[in-house]
Image (cartoon, rainbow, N blue to C red):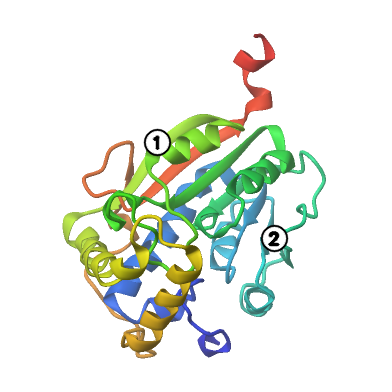
Amino acid sequence: MSHDLDVTGERLVEEQYRASLGGYVIYLMHAASYRFAEQYCHGKKVLDLGCGTGYGAYAIADKAKEVSAVDVSTEAIEYARRKYVKSNIKFDVIHPEERLPFSDRSFDVVLSFQVIEHVENDAKYLAEAERVLRDDGLLVLITPDRQLRLLPGQCPWNRWHLREYSEEGLTRLMAERFQIERSLHMGARHDVANVEIKRYRILKWITLPVTFPGVPEKWRRFGLDLIHRIRPQRMKTAAPVEPDFGVEDIVISPMVENSLNLILVGKPRRFSPDLANP
């Protein structure tokens, strides 16, 4: 089944990412994201906004009342429909330039994990998340923390990312439409986090000639595509690695030593008592 979908680095395919140590750490962070979200999903109507291959929607379906999982990739949704089947999950393709195919105030929870950095118009993306949330609903958003990944001002070395966020920048953007309830970081014990940090250190310097501050997007993407074709690909199809750590070694806290991801949880601002009573 894992060979039904090409592994490009844009979306996570469980089996492929568990076949190398670096991939396994990335997989653990994705798994930890959905485990973190479970506390908000019990008995709730959940939208997984940018579900990718569907592994996360499947993971939370046992807790949620129902899960609507959507993505812009037809290929990813077809894969999810084949592999992750549960009676309370519905997978659908959406179009990035169109409104979400849901009525206002349709969901209790919207999950956005490793998605906002991919979208052209991040403000519009958040506006749609707000629109489909009930007044007391929650957006749980997780995205890479640029602090360790990038040099100051550097554009993303991930060819699928249009931008990456600092904690301050993401908070400012999300606060335009959401009342921030929690602001957290995702890290890991030192040896686990160091697998990712070493990868960041290599990639940010290798790609700097095409990711320097202010580089035109056309140049950046062309250069990164070229590097991707030339650089040896280490993702293997061998049996899964068996390291001595797991998802329990991923740390989520307001302060962590090595922040790999940012986590913000917020309610629509229309529900804020401060806004209701100016």
Query: Quadrant location of the C terminus?
Result: top right
Specify the quadrant of the image occupied by residue 158.
bottom left
Q: Along the polypeptide, which appears first: circle 1 or circle 2?
A: 2
The reply to whether callout 1 and callout 2 are in contact (CB within 8 Å) is no
Vertically, is 242 above or below 268? Answer: below
Query: In the drawing, does residue 235 fall left or right of residue 2?
Result: left
Residue at point 26%, 72% (across, down): 206
Residue in the picture at 68% in, 14% down: 276
Q: Which residue is drawn at 59% across and 61% down?
A: 57
- The residue tagged 2 is 96
Q: Is residue 180 left or right of residue 212?
A: right
Q: Is residue 137 left or right of residue 3?
A: right
At x 73%, y 63%, the residue is: 95
Quadrant placement of the N terminus: bottom right
Q: Position of residue 192 (x, y in %)?
A: 22, 62
Within 10 angstroms of label 2, few (less than 14), some, or many (20 or more) residues?
some
| Local SS, label 2 | loop
Q: Which amino acid does label 1 sit on?
A: Glu
Task: Tell me the residue that label 1 is attached to.
Answer: 168
Q: Which of 158 and 92 is in front in this view?
A: 158
Tell me if I can see residue 44 in this picture: no
Kind of residue sitting beneath label 2: Pro
The image shows residue 224 at horizontal and vertical percentages of 40, 75
Residue 113 visible within the image:
yes
Residue at the far top in the pictured view: 278
Q: Quadrant of residue 201?
A: bottom left
Q: Is residue 31 left or right of residue 80?
A: left
